[in-house]
Amino acid sequence: MQSIIKPPAGFSFGLKEVWQYRELFYFFTWRDIKVKYKQAYLGVFWALLQPLGMMVIFTFLFSKTWKIDTGIIQYPIFVLAGLICWNLFSSSVSHAAESMIQHAGIINKIYFPRIIIPGSSVLVALFDFMMGFIVFIIFCLIYKQPVHWPSVWCFPAGIIIVLIAAFGAGTFLSALNVKYRDFRYTIGFFLQVMFFASQVIYPLQSIQQSWLKYILAINPVNAAIELFRSAFAGGYADTTTVYIGIASAFLLLLIGIYYFRKTEAYFADIV
Amino acid sequence: MKPAIEIRNLGKQYKLATAKSYMALRDVITGGIKNIFSGIEKKKERFWALKDIDLDIMPGERVGIIGRNGAGKSTLLKIISRITPPTAGSAIIRGRVGSLLEVGTGFHPELTGRENIYLNGSILGLRRTEISKKLDEIIDFSGVEKFIDTPLKHYSSGMQLRLAFSVAAHLEPEILLIDEVLSVGDMEFQKKCIGKMEEVSKSHGRTILFVTHNLDSLRKFCSTTILLNEGKMVEKGDTEKIISLYVSKHLQTNAEMVWENGLSSANKEIMLHKAWITDDNGSTRSRFDTTEKVAICMEYEVMADDTAFTHGINVFNQEQQNIFNSHDVMTGNGDNRKKKGRYMATVWVPANLLPEGIFSVSLALFLPNPLDVLIHEHNKLSFEMYTDFSKQTARGNYAEAFPGVVRPLLNWEITKK
C-alpha cells in the first residue's frame, strides 16, 4: 500500500477512495441506525410519528376544512406521499449539514474520505424513509387507493431524485457549516421555506401562474412528489416539473460535491 | 529497499489563528461591510509550522522526533497520517499508518463493547474480516470480556480506555506514529500497548515515529532522532548526539550566568558575579522532572561592611506570566547587615510545584523597606520541567493536556461520613 501526500490540487470526485473505504461508510450508517433503533419499538415509532401526525393534521385541514382538489388521489394518500418525500429530503439535509461538526473528534484524529460522513447521514435518513414507505403502502391498502401498475418505477425514481438533491445540498451545507459556524441557524428556516415551496399539501398543478410553477419546479422535491403521485394518477406526471427537478438535483449534487471536495482538506485545521 | 516514508520539501503553512480558526458568517458579513467602508482588506498573518522538510525513513527504522513546543513535531505527524494536508512538497508513505493519537476514536456509548470494536477497528482502517479474526485476541487483551456485550456507557472510563488501546494495539500498522504529548489515558496500559507494538515492530520490522519530551524514553526506544526547530529540520542522526545538541543548543535554557567583571549595583555596594541553577546534588543543570527540587543560586560580593539588602527572584512561564516571586524573609528580612566578602544565596523551588514547561528567572538584590532595587536582572536563567511518568507526580496517570499555572501535589483526605 502506497499513498502520496501532496498539497491539494485540481479536482476529482474521489470515488475510487470512497470505494476503498466502503466498509467505513457501512459502519457509520450501521452505527447511526443501530443507535437510533436500539429501543426497537421506540425507534420505529419516532420515525413514523412525525409523518403520520402531519398527515392527520393536513388531512383534517385541507380535505375537511379547506378543500384542496387532488383529483382521483384521496387526500390522506396525496399528502402522505408528499410528506415522506419531503421528510427524506429535510432529514437528510439537516442531519448531513450537522454531521461534520458532530464528527469533529474523528476528523481531527484520523484520515478517511470526509464525504462518507454526510453520505451516511443521507443513508440513515433513507432507512427512516423505508419505514415510512412501508406505512405508506399500508395506508394505500387501507384506503384502497388504485395504483397504476406500469408506473411503479416512479417510486424508486422519485427516491433517487430526492437522494441526489439531498446529498448535494447536505454536503454543501456541511462544508459551509464547518467554515461558518453560525450558518446552522439558517438551515431550519431555509428548510421551512422549502417545505412550503414543495407540493406536499397542495398540487403544483393547482397554481395558476405558470412562471411560478416553473420556479417552484426548481425544487427537486417537487419532481419526486410529482412522480410518486403519478403512480396513482394513471402515470400522468407533469414532465416539465420532473425534468427541471432532475436537472436541479444534479446541479445541487455537483455544487455540493465540488464545494465539499474543495474545502475538505482543511477541515481538520478548522473544525 | 525503498523508504517507508519519503518526504520532500514538505511544508505546512497556517493562518495565524488569533482567537478561533473558524469564522462566523456574521463576522464575514460585518467584516466585509467594514472593509468596504475602510477600503482596507485585513491582511492575514501566516506562518510556516513546517518548512523544507526532507526526510527518508527506512522500513523498520525507529525514529524519535524532538523539539521545543511549536517546533512542528505534531504537525509532521498529522501530515503523515493525512489528517491535514501539506501546503508544499510531498510525502510518499509506503504501508498502513496507525497512531496512538486515534485511540478510542469513534467509540459510541450506546453500542456494546463488541460493536465498538468493529466500529473503531473499521475507523482505524481494519477490514471487517480482519477484525473478526482478531476479535478474541482483542477482547482478551482488553480484560473486559465479562462486559463485552454491555453498552459502553456502563463501562468505567478505565475500561473504555483498555478496550480502545486493545484495538489500537492489534492494528499492526506498518508505520506507527506515537505522540506521547497527545496520547491519552492510563500510562501503565499505554506502556503495555507500546510494549506490544514494540514487540511487533521488532519481529516484523515495523517503522515507528515517536514524538516525546521525555529524553529517557527516547534513548530507550529510538536509535535515530530528528531535531526540529521552528518548523525546520535541524538534524537527523544518532539519538545520543541529537539529544545533546538539543539540550545544549535548542532547549534555550540557560542554567548558568556569569558576569565576568561583576555587575555592580548603582550604589556600588554589591557586585553580582554569577547565578546558576542546580539540583539536589549541587550539579548545574537545566532540565528537571517535576518531582525534583530546583535550586537557584547567586554569588555576589559585598563591597562595604554593614550593607543591608535582601534577595529575590521572579519566575515566569513560557507565556510570560509571572508565576511567583519570592524574597528572602527567612534570614532577617533585609535587616541583617553583611560584612564585606563573597556570599552565595540559594533558594529552593520545592518539588511538585511547577508543571511542565520552560521557566525563566529574574534575579534581584534590593532593600525591601523602603523599596530600593539595587540589582534586577531580567530573565537571566531558565530551566525546563518535564514529567517523568515513572514517578509519583501530580499528573497521576493522566497523560493528556493538564492545564494550570502551577501543579502542586496535594494531599487528599477521604473520610466516610
Image (cartoon, coloured by chain):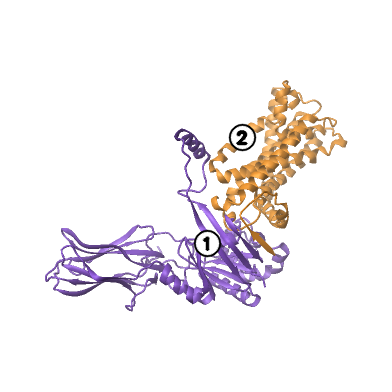
Chain colours: A orange, B purple
- Per the image, label 2 sits on a secondary structure element best described as helix
Please give the residue where the numbered disc 1 appears in the rendered image: B74
In-image side of B217 versus A236 (left or right) = left
Count of numbered badges drawn on the protein = 2
Identify which residue, B187 or A37, lies in the foreground.
B187
Q: Which mark is residue A190?
A: 2
Q: Which amino acid, by three-letter code, is at mark 2?
A: Phe
Q: Residue at x 52, y 46 (%)?
A: B22
- Residue B73 x %, y %: 51, 63
In-image side of B386 versus A245 (left or right) = left
Say if B228 sits above or below B87 in the image. Answer: below
- Residue B256 x %, y %: 32, 71
Q: Are marks 1 and 2 on the same chain?
A: no
In-image side of A19 versus B288 (left or right) = right
Say if A37 sits above or below B386 in the image. Answer: above
Question: Chain for mark 2?
Answer: A
The image quadrant where one finds the N terminus of chain B is: bottom right
- Residue B105 x %, y %: 59, 59
Badge 1 density bin: few <14, some 14–19, many ≥20, Cα 10 Å: some
Q: Which amino acid, by three-letter code, is at mark 1?
A: Ser
Contact between marks 1 and 2 (CB within 8 A): the answer is no
Does residue B144 show up?
Answer: no
